[in-house]
Image: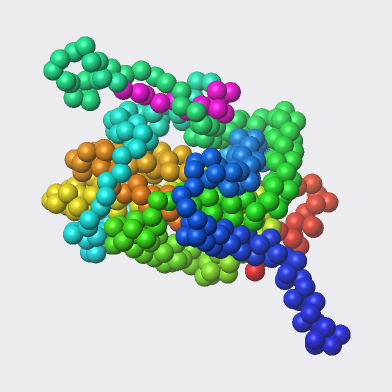
Amino acid sequence: MTRPKQDANKFKSFMQENVLTMATVIGVFVGGLIGFIIKNSTGEWTKREIMYISFPGEIFLRMLKCLIVPLLVSSITSAIGGLDLSMSSKIATRAITYYFVTTISAVILGICLVTTIRPGQGAKIVETRTETIDKASKVLTPDTLMDLVRNMFTDNIIQSTMFQHRTEIFENTSITPAQPMENWEFKSAQREGSNVLGLVMFSVILGTTIGRMREKGQLLQDFFTTLSEAMMTITSWVIWISPLGVAFLIAAKIIEMESIAATIQSLGWYFITVMIGLFLHGFGTIAVIFFLGTRRMPYRFIAKLSQVLATAFGTGSSSATMPLTIKCLDNMGIDPRVTRFVIPVGATINMDGTALYEAVAALFIAQYREMSYSFGTIVAVSITATAASIGAAGIPQAGLVTMVMVLDTVGLEPKDVSLIIAVDWLLDRFRTTINVMCDALGTILVNHLSKNDLASVDRLNAEPHELLELGTSGHEMKE
């Protein structure tokens, strides 16, 4: 075969393997370009007109969200059930350790940057008041933390597929004088949205039980494995819509902004500080941790995750991106048992970008209000930002509510969230992209560290005639 023909075949093969990735990345840029052109060339658009623009993207997002609950439950249950208890605990320990280290590193990096750059000094911000901010401000930190634990231990697994528990507080206006929020009345309520923490906890327990039942639980194990494979097949169909959906989502969001230039100008240094932090964490801190664990640089794997990262940016939801992340890692040769456990758990509790953003935001607002803070306050912000990021659901702008916890730690008014809400939607997409990238690289790292253990489990469970095949194959990271 001649060299030109070989090159042509390689190019053709490359295009076939990466056509969807390139189309998704192009969709991000095209959506942004269309949004800017429409924004600058026409008059003000009504909410209904913006809704028409975002409709194709909304359908794409609904299709992805539809897959979350069945995929999450079946993936975690089948992954845990397919391993013995000791192997499950090893994978879980490695994953949780990785998530804890990266989250703490993100918070520390954010605090270092915001105390060095000091973006809040001299900032001139137009404060924004919205109904969302008013609702978010009516929460107490103890209630939020207890609701986190309540949601982990759900009392109704069916209800958890649709609702989350939330403690609501309200002022009794018949009592005078006005009471502090700690003395307000409270009630238990159900907020719309899947209780992902509860579903993860239930799936882990169910998978562990099936694994302990061995032969008796095989039928149930086969059911969840088949369901997981079916969900991934549907995902492979849905992802072909991603370039179109992402383009319309971004275009509509840009058109919706009142003034992009004015927003960036008023919050310029804050925006730059968060972006520097996200970049350094994603391509610096995580890269170092990945290299120490695998002795490989992560950038080649990040390139293969281009479509996933572009979709994460377009949707602003780590949970909605989860089916695509699992599919991409499967194509990269990562052990499905690792992928189907680590990714759903990561999409729920690992929010590095959110933790960094909330730490920076709290201290930025403190600087803007000219409020002094001690080293103890910084430590308190670190702990609270870490806890808040774990409690943040993997849905767009979920950090708005947990941000109130961090502000309360610094002693700031909850409604000070209004100072940064103007750029929250854009930063939300960048931090979601970092969250998803961290989850994916963590899965590759855990798979690498668990390779020998997984091989030994395969040999223990394999039939004699399968041992030869196991010796010549295995789950390696494809490069």
Residue 461 seen anywhere in this rendered image of the structure: no
Say which of 63 and 232 sits in front: 63
**Placement of the N terminus among the 4 image quadrants:** bottom right
Residue 59, position as x, y percentages in the image: 63, 42
Would residue 30 be counted in the magenta stretch?
Answer: no
Residue depicted at 53% across the width and 32% down the height:
194
Asked if residue 131 shows in the view, the reply is: yes
> Which residue occupies the extreme right position in the image?
1
Across and down, in percent, residue 252 comes to: 53, 50
**Range of the magenta residues?**
157-169
The structure residue drawn at horizontal position 18% and vertical position 59%, both measured from the top left corner, is 122
Residue nearer the viewer, 91 or 76: 76
Q: Nearer the viewer, residue 109 or 271?
A: 271
Which residue is found at the position 30% from the left and 57% from the top? 267
Horizontal side of 239 relative to 197 (left or right) equals right
**Residue 106, image x and y in percent?**
36, 56
Q: Is residue 86 left or right of residue 469?
A: left
Vertical order, 301 against 345 (above or below): below
Quadrant in the picture for residue 66: top right
- Name the side, left or right, on which 295 lies relative to 104: right
The residue under the point 16% across, 20% down is 178
Q: Residue furthest front?
A: 43
Asked if 38 appears above or below 198 in the picture, the reply is below
